[in-house]
Image (tube, helix red, strand yellow):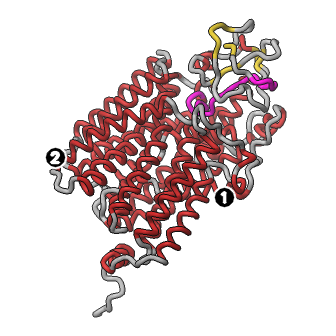
Amino acid sequence: MGVQVWTWILVGITFAIYFGIAIWARAGSTKDFYVAGGGVSPLANGLATAADWMSAASFISMAGIISFSGYDGSVYLMGWTGGYVLLALLLAPYLRKFGKFTVPDFIGDRYYSNTARTVAVICALIVSFTYVAGQMRGVGIVFSQFLQVDITLGVIIGMAVVLVFAFLGGMKGITYTQVAQYCVLIFAFMVPAIFISFQMTGSPIPQIGMGGKVEDGAYLLDKLDQLHTQLGFKAYTSGSKSTWDVFAITLALMVGTAGLPHVIVRFFTVPKVKDARKSAGLALLFIAILYTTAPAIAVFSRTNLIETVSNTAYKNMPQWFRNWENTGLIAWTDKNNDGKIQYVNGAALEGKTPMFLSERGEHGQRVISNSSTGPNELYVDRDIMVLANPEIAKLPDWVIALVAAGGLAAALSTAAGLLLVISTSVSHDLIKKQLRPDISDKAELKIARISIVVAIIVAGIFGIYPPGFVAAVVALAFGLAAASFFPAIILGIFDKRMNKEGAVAGMVVGTVLMLFYMVRFKTGLVGVLDPLPESEWWFGTSPEGFGTVAMLVNVVIAVVISRVTPAPPASVQDIVENIRIPSGAGQASTH
């Protein structure tokens, strides 16, 4: 059987499992829909949280970023895993003890203000829609290549799949679907990594293989450094980012992780505070399996790509290259007319993506109409590195198909969690808590499901027209979460004096500042305003790292304004004391 047949089989089996779980775990109440009835075990919640958090960015794009950025890509590893430690220690237990369904619910009650709740809803929608764009893009990439359909159609298929298990089961259906999706995605990520590690270094453990020796006796990383420098790239193990920008990106990703609403809500699904702590620790363990393997996959795929493609005649290129060429995610143009692919440092294109002409060139290349004047002839979308890696390494067809199923599991699991946040923000925090407090449970559930349908349509549009490659889009979502939610949550737990005026002002200023920076330096305004170049960055801070600056501004404004305005009511201060101090703490012993 070929790759496509294997892909249809494995994707079909996994989708059948997801649909079966969705039907079995159909939500019958708003509590089921929002927090899975609050009865999920720590193990199941740990698996579901890992799947919710390890999105298409983790599975598809993170190793791709590290593959192209080398040492500089380590910020994603440090930020996303460090953020989980913050979440487990500083937020999850306290939020679970507070006992609300959503982050806007916590902020609305903690800051005794519907204005604060509304601002939190708006922030949740902005963060979730920015994040979900990356997931739908990942779905489109996988479907485009492995099922041989257009990326747009792939996104639409992904929308339909998510709709089924999110619409029927809400958090209850999503939780148990994500348990299955974690098992699929981690198996799909590890199997090719083990194969390739053994193939290249003789070690079946990828983390050891990355630092091992290859056939000629050289260390693999030394060999990759040499390949890089020969082609004009910086050494793979050296960094080019400033120390400040590395710190800013890492911190923005850390506090952004701790402030992501779709991850935080998972800790409301377990019965007790102790279970929230357990599930956070288990999730970190499950996440570490993938995150310690990603750098190894980056090294393997980068080495294989350079050795396979660089200075090779197109007529001798293997079939995988032509397959991916058809998706537009890899392309080359023969600038010196020698029939060979010159892969050297520099941009192959004037724009960000190739624009193919209808004909092929003299040597079979797909002629690109927006080629740059530099010597580099190869364009590679970094999002394909994990997906193409098994093909480049000539692994069996079923392994290649397994990676496709894993990529879909990663993207769909996170997309479902994000869409539920969007749905509950509208139905629970906006409609139930503010506009129609007397709404029935049945009517609220109906509005939640309608909200999911609308959210999926909007998410699909973002997936078809994404503002950049997957991990960059996701990094911006983390920056927005850092700039908006994290200060309000952390100060709400640990600062009794923090009031509604300070929290609202901080969230508004932090979010607006981050959005402004994204527009000016990353996305621009199509047809109106081009993004400014790197030389114009404020304090040398990249858009991915600016969440740190916006977060600090949020904290300063929130603290200052809270000190010059009235203190929160005594009842609110008592709540803050209660969620931070265990029951019975400080009482005199009678024994």
Q: CA distance from mark 2 to mark 1?
A: 48 Å
In this view, the residue in front, 329 or 410, is 329
Which image quarter: residue 66? top right
Q: Mark 1 sits on what residue?
A: 247
Q: Look at the picture and state if 591 lies above or below 35.
A: below
Disc 2 is placed on an element classified as helix
Residue 35 in sight here: no
Q: Kindly identify the residue that appears in the image at 75 percent across and 46 percent down.
A: 535
Residue 240 in the image: state x and y as whole percent. Answer: 76, 48
Nearest-to-viewer mark from 2 and 1: 2
Q: Mark 2 sits on what residue?
A: 442
Q: Which residues are magenta?
A: 372-388
Residue 144 in the image: state x and y as whole percent. Answer: 50, 22
Q: Is residue 462 magenta?
A: no
Residue 411 in the image: state x and y as whole percent. Answer: 45, 37
Query: Alpha-carbon neighbours of circle 1 within 10 Å: few (<14), some, or many (≥20)?
Result: some
Q: Kindly identify the residue that appears in the image at 54 percent across and 23 percent down.
A: 396
Residue 233 in sight here: yes
Residue 386 left/right relative to 277: right
Which image quarter: residue 310? top right
Q: How many numbered tags mark residues here?
A: 2
In this view, the residue in front, 230 or 266, is 266
Disc 1 is placed on an element classified as helix
